[in-house]
Image (tube, rainbow, N blue to C red):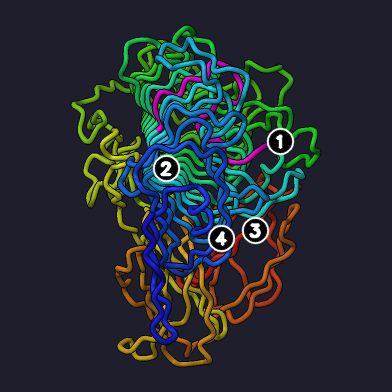
């Protein structure tokens, strides 16, 4: 063992580097490590049993505390070795777990043996291969091995702001998910602490558990904490060649999560929004290329407020045995349920099905798929007395089925449709064709990994302006859409950089280049209320960004720092600043990457010489009427009420003083009031209708 000691010059503590080859030395050095220190495990094969690391020296903004293999894959853990760790800003990299058996213990766990969680930590360049709790079995991709009765997870994520990236997980055939995000409370419907975790650029291959439940690849939460606003991002992962029986590759069980730019190739199952609300699923690729039936489907939508858009689904055959009847393995399917999630907080319902509610299914491409229907509204495999999906919007989707119907709606489902194009051997499948047009759809050659849509989709989307905020102006590849959008996931004449396409094993997983697509600043705006400026910015591809630095100037030349906001994989950020009445105020953003590089946004200016209009609305939530108290408004000011896609539902002029607005015609859900002066939107106010 070689130890490179810590050097101190004056009051400056320099980073230390240690090389270790015993379990006890690793644990002691990691316990004492400070930010900037590195503990390196010498190359070799080790059987260490439980390795539990506790460190209390790190902080979320300091340098990493690093635990790494001497060379990538040069350290192999086998037999019963498993790793537990807690601390802040710990980075673990380069290890391989192979042909081992940790029994009921998780192979890697973001908490130590005392149960203390890890926060702001990162697991990268890790390989876990055939580390199953049944040591007698082997996986041969035939689906014949059950994997025994002992269940364990390969990666269990506890704490907040953690990341798992560029890892490879292969040959898992025993029960329990490969990876789980856990929470700090299991008292439904109480909300746990938001986790803000990120799972990206990983390779999941040959997942083959032949039991039924508890066989998904990734689970994000549990039924008991499904009301938690979690804000996790699962992106740029590849799921390939899985033959699991569980119908869920990803199982979502918390709220406000984002699933984007993932590839699901030749893998039984699909992405299921099983529990939890208000998730976004976009830019994903579901593709089957093998001949045998794999029961691969696309996206299942359960519960309230989900948005499914810009996804590409090709050759899926999950429902191949059913030509006209519905089945849970269709390309996109919305579920009936025992009730609506907004109707109850009774723990009895926590792990049951809530009916799909207020969902958006828009700008998806379904091509050469087989089954009952391309888009199913109301899975009727459950009791017919179940509650049916309500308030569903199906818009500008491109559906080309090689078998079955284009769409299906169960009796009692309430939905609206516009701009959809379809071709299917057994027709549309709906009692009304409103919002659906039958076309001859012939797809072209494969470009950027996907089949090119026919030219008829070009500039054919209905009501583009209603979907600008939903799509952020992008298509499935991340290209800029034209002023009038194309129908389906791809914009034929899209411009700008391609930021996503179907992944392969050279792009993700352990040992692949740690490259990230740069963040994209979609918009940066400012609005004024008295002397307070509200800054708001919208971003996409927040992959390698560390933080936003907000800067301020009174002359537009010399800027000073106002504050910093950590990049937490959201799409929208806000910052408020009281300028103290300065006549003109300039603001800009400094976008700082994890490697220290940065770029600036353009500066925006606010003029405070004029009094800003103010409106206050109440009650919020509302049951049928909203009172708006308006101050400092100009003549002919009016308000516009939109849903969260931007679709205009109602507008009305308002005057100074108290205004009563009737919203009885609007259903339960989230809405936005825009106040417009002289034709320009000057402020936005969210509100909720709940009856």
437 drawn magenta: no
- Residue located 37% across and 53% down the image: 541
Residue range corresponding to the magenta coloring? 204-222
Q: Nearer the viewer, residue 86 or 459?
A: 86
Observer-side mark, 4 or 3, equals 4
Relative to 180, is 143 above or below?
A: above
Measured in 3D between alpha carbons, the distance from the residue under mark 3 to the one under mark 2, in whole angstroms, is 27 Å
What separation in Å lies between label 1 and label 2 (alpha carbons)? 26 Å
Is the residue 342 above or below the residue 441 in the image? below
Q: Can residue 200 be seen in this view?
A: yes
Which tag, 4 or 3, sits closer to the chain's start?
Answer: 4
Residue 201 visible: no
C-alpha gap between disc 4 and disc 1: 44 Å
Q: Nearer the viewer, residue 284 or 386?
A: 284
Tell me the mark number nearer the camera, choosing from 2 and 4: 4
- Residue 654 in the image: x percent, y percent? 61, 69
Task: Name the residue beneath numbered marker 2.
Answer: 260
| Nearer the camera: disc 4 or disc 1 | 4
Q: Which mark is residue 55?
A: 4
- The residue labelled by disc 3 is 687
Q: Tags 4 and 3 in contact by the CB under 8 Å rule? A: no
Among numbered discs 1 and 3, the one appearing first in the sequence: 1
Residue depicted at 49% across the width and 59% down the height? 29
**Cα gap from disc 4 to disc 3, whole angstroms:** 44 Å
Q: Quadrant of the N terminus?
A: bottom left
Q: Main secondary structure of the magenta part?
A: loop
Question: From the viewer's perspective, is 495 left or right of 113?
Answer: left
Q: Residues within 10 Å of mark 1 (few under 14, many from 20)?
A: many
Q: Earlier in the sequence, mark 4 or mark 1?
A: 4
Q: Which residue is drawn at 22% across and 36% down?
A: 448
Residue marked by disc 1: 340
Give the mark nearer the N terminus: 3 vs 2. Answer: 2
């Amino acid at each position: 063992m070689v130890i490179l000691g810590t050097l101190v010059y004056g009051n400056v503590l320099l980073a230390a580097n240690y090389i270790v080859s015993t379990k006890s030395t690793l644990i002691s050095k990691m316990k004492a490590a400070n930010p900037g220190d590195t503990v390196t495990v010498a190359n070799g094969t080790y059987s260490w049993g439980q390795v539990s690391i506790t460190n209390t020296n790190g902080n979320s903004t300091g340098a990493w505390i690093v635990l790494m293999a001497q060379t990538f894959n040069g350290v192999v853990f086998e037999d019963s070795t498993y790793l537990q760790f807690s601390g802040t800003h710990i980075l673990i990299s380069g290890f391989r777990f192979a042909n081992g058996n940790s029994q009921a213990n998780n192979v890697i766990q973001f908490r130590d043996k005392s149960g203390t969680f890890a926060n702001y930590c990162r697991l990268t360049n890790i390989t876990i291969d055939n580390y199953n709790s049944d040591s007698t079995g082997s996986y041969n991709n035939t689906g014949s091995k059950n994997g025994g009765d002992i269940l364990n997870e390969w990666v269990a994520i506890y704490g907040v702001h953690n990341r798992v990236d560029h890892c490879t997980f292969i040959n898992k055939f025993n029960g329990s998910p490969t990876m789980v995000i856990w929470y700090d409370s299991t008292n439904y419907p109480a909300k746990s602490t938001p986790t803000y975790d990120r799972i990206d650029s990983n390779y999941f291959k040959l997942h083959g558990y032949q039991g039924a439940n508890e066989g998904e690849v990734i689970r994000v939460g549990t039924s008991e904490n499904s009301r938690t606003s979690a804000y996790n991002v699962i992106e740029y992962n590849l799921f390939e060649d899985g033959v699991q029986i569980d119908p869920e590759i990803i199982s979502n069980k918390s709220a406000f999560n984002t699933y984007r730019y993932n590839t699901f190739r030749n893998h039984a199952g699909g992405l299921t929004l099983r529990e939890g609300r208000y998730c976004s699923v976009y830019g994903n690729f579901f593709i089957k290329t093998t001949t045998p039936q794999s029961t691969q489907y696309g996206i299942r939508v359960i519960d309230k407020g989900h948005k499914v858009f810009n996804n590409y689904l090709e050759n899926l055959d999950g429902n191949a045995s059913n030509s006209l009847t519905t089945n849970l393995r269709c390309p996109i399917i919305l579920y009936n349920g025992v009730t609506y999630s907004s109707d109850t907080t009774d723990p009895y319902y926590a792990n049951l099905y809530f009916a799909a509610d207020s969902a958006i299914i828009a700008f998806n491409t379904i091509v050469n798929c087989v089954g009952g229907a391309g888009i199913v509204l109301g899975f009727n495999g459950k009791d017919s007395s179940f509650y049916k999906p309500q308030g569903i919007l199906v818009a500008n989707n491109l559906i080309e089925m090689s078998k079955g119907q284009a769409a299906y709606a169960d009796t009692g489902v309430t939905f609206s449709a516009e701009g959809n194009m379809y071709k299917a051997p057994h027709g549309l499948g709906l009692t009304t064709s409103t919002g659906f047009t039958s076309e001859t759809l012939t797809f072209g050659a494969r470009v950027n990994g996907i089949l090119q849509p026919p030219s008829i989709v070009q500039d054919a989307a209905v009501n583009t302006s209603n979907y600008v905020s939903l799509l952020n102006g992008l298509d499935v590849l991340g290209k800029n859409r034209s002023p009038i959008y194309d129908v389906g996931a791809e914009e034929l004449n899209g411009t700008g950089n391609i930021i996503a396409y179907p992944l392969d094993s050279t792009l993700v997983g352990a040992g692949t280049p740690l490259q990230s697509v740069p963040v994209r600043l979609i918009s940066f705006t400012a609005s004024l209320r008295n002397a307070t400026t509200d800054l708001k910015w919208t971003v996409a591809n927040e992959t390698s960004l560390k933080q936003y630095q907000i800067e301020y100037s009174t002359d537009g030349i010399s800027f000073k720092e106002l504050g910093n906001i950590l990049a937490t994989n959201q799409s929208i950020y806000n910052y408020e600043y009281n300028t103290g009445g300065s006549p003109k105020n300039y603001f800009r953003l400094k976008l700082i990457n994890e490697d220290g590089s940065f770029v600036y946004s353009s500066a925006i200016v606010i003029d405070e010489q004029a009094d800003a209009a103010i409106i206050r609305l109440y009650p919020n939530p509302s049951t049928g009427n909203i009172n708006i108290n308006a101050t400092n408004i100009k003549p002919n000011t009016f308000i516009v009420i939109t849903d969260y896609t931007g679709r205009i539902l109602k507008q009305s002029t308002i005057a100074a003083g108290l205004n009563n607005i009737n919203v009885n015609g609007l259903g339960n859900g989230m809405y936005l009031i825009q106040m417009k002066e002289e034709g320009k939107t000057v402020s936005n106010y969210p509100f909720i209708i709940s009856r």
